[in-house]
Amino acid sequence: MISASDLRLTFGKGTPLENPALRGMSLTVNQGEFVTVIGSNGAGKSTFLNALSGEVLVDSGEIIVDNTDVTKLPTHKRAGQVARVFQDPLAGTCEALSIEENLALAIKRGQRRGLTAAVKKQYLEQFRDSLSSLNLGLENRLGDKMGLLSGGQRQAVSLLMASLTPSSILLLDEHTAALDPKTAAFVLELTTQIIEEQQLTALMVTHSMKQALEVGSRTVMLHQGQVVFDIAGKEREGLEVKDLLGLFEKQRGLSVDDDSLLLG
Amino acid sequence: MLSEIALYGAIETGLIYGLVAFGIYISFRVLDFPDLTVDGSFPLGAAVAAMLIIAGWNPWIATGAAILAGMAAGAVTALLNVKLKILNLLASILTMIALYSVNLRIMGRPNVALLTEETVLTPWYNLDLAYHHVPVLLFVIVVAVSLILLWRFMKSETGLAMRATGANPRMARAQGIATGAMIVLGVALSNGLVGLAGALFAQSQGAADVTMGVGVIVIGLASLIGGEAVITPSTVVRALLACVIGAIIYRLAIAFALNADFLGLQAQDLNLITAVLVTLAIVLPGVRTSVIGKLTRNKA
């Protein structure tokens, strides 16, 4: 479980470029939930994900992961609990390292690293098994440099790396946005498959309202650094993009701190 | 033509600079951290080893102390960058400048002679070998051991984490790697190797001198880049071999240039030759591909 309460963060405080990215963002994601997050540019989606992963530290508020307060911990100290796939397919993997070396890095996510060989024989079978589930033929290319793979293949491997060891939450930051439609569909399908199979708790940011409704079990919309609506279960079933737009327009006219009116 | 002694001398120095090139490979290539500390850590290693040998220490232990001193210098540079957020290049220049004073303090004077002292080379002269073969033999062993240890390290969990830190720090952090600690470890390791090189250089040349570090970074880079032009560094072991081979080729090139009378070059032209060689090493691979490109285009 991951719980963020009243997160506030302003970039460039006291400068003409002052930009309040998070203005009291609160969200609790329960064990096994798959939450999709939508919002326009500047709504604070990426900042929220960066705050959860530790890439940025919030000015105030609290982030609790599985009963541990991680609010002040840097990224690498949270990595054992927080797995992440980036938007840029090149960001999640190391192109100078081989496929097996990338996977070997991921299998030790958040653990102590020693002086024994990184790529161990006992890992190789696991690597081949997981790679073959991608149906990309990568299981026979363990020694190839990551840089030889296409963006879609690299994103698929990033996803695999994020799910190689257990985590409290998997953060997906518009991870299909930089791919062509066909590859994006493949990566998205792979995402839902992995999340279902391993019963992962996940938070997926997306630009596409359609995607946000099609996958996952709950949808959250952000606007101006806050959650404007949060729908799950029956409410969410059968909802279409136009309903979502309607909801959003309705919310925008309202005072955002008026909770009783949300989804009213 | 080059005499046999000059040839072996060039190989001997080349092997020592191979260790420097290992260090520069770690900072420049693995960590992507342009580190100029080496100009200070090379004479630091020499000074520490020389003073301890004169004080009666076992030369190998003195050499080990030189490695530790080099590592400490590297750690200072890395901490200036990681903790105080000083630009990496500037941080290394600060340490390098500071080390000039430190080295003078350690030695108490600008240079220290070791000619009459027992060094790591002394026992090897009892072997039934030509005098000028001895340092080459010993340094081949030292370089080979260092290469194997470094290769194993780069393949280890920690080594892989270090390589990821240099190649993609954001991804490394997301995998739980403390990138700051990796930079400190890597730059320390790099300068430890350079300290070792300085200690061996002082013992083979019979003196430590406070100015002996000038241009070490350029020579190390020349060796690294030259080696990479000869051996494509597609794997760690190839990259390490490229360092050694590049360093030996560089020293041989210098020896030939100084020996070729028709060029009229003298010892004081060394730094000029170095700069020209580095420029050629950087530019030539690009020229080669563009020339090949033009030729093939003409054919087509």
Image (spheres, coloured by chain):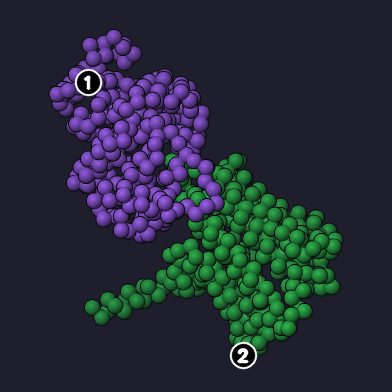
The colour of chain B is green
The colour of chain A is purple
Q: In which quarter of the view is residue B120 placed?
A: bottom right
Q: Nearer the viewer, residue B58 or B238?
A: B58
**Residue type pointed to by label 2:** Met
**Label 2 Cα crowd, 10 Å radius (few <14 / some 14-19 / many 20+):** few
Residue B178 lies, with reference to residue A70, above or below; the image says: below
Left or right of A46? Residue A197 is left
Q: Is residue A159 visible?
A: yes
Q: Disc 2 vs disc 1: which is toward the camera?
A: 1
Q: Which residue is mark 2?
A: B1
How far is the residue under mark 2 from the one under mark 1?
Answer: 87 Å
In the rendered structure, find residue A233 and report the number of the disc placed on it. 1
Residues at discs 2 and 1 in contact (Cβ within 8 Å): no
The residue depicted at 35 percent of the width and 34 percent of the height is A171
Left or right of B66? Residue B271 is left
Helix, strand or loop under label 1: helix
Q: Residue B266 placed where, x, y %?
A: 67, 81
Q: Nearer the viewer, residue B54 or A112?
A: A112
**Residue type pointed to by label 1:** Gly
The residue depicted at 42 percent of the width and 49 percent of the height is A104
Q: Quadrant of the C terminus of chain A?
A: top left
Q: Is residue A249 visible?
A: no
Q: Quadrant of the N terminus of chain A?
A: top left
Q: Residue A58 placed where, x, y %?
A: 46, 27
Chain letter of the residue beneath label 2 in the structure image: B
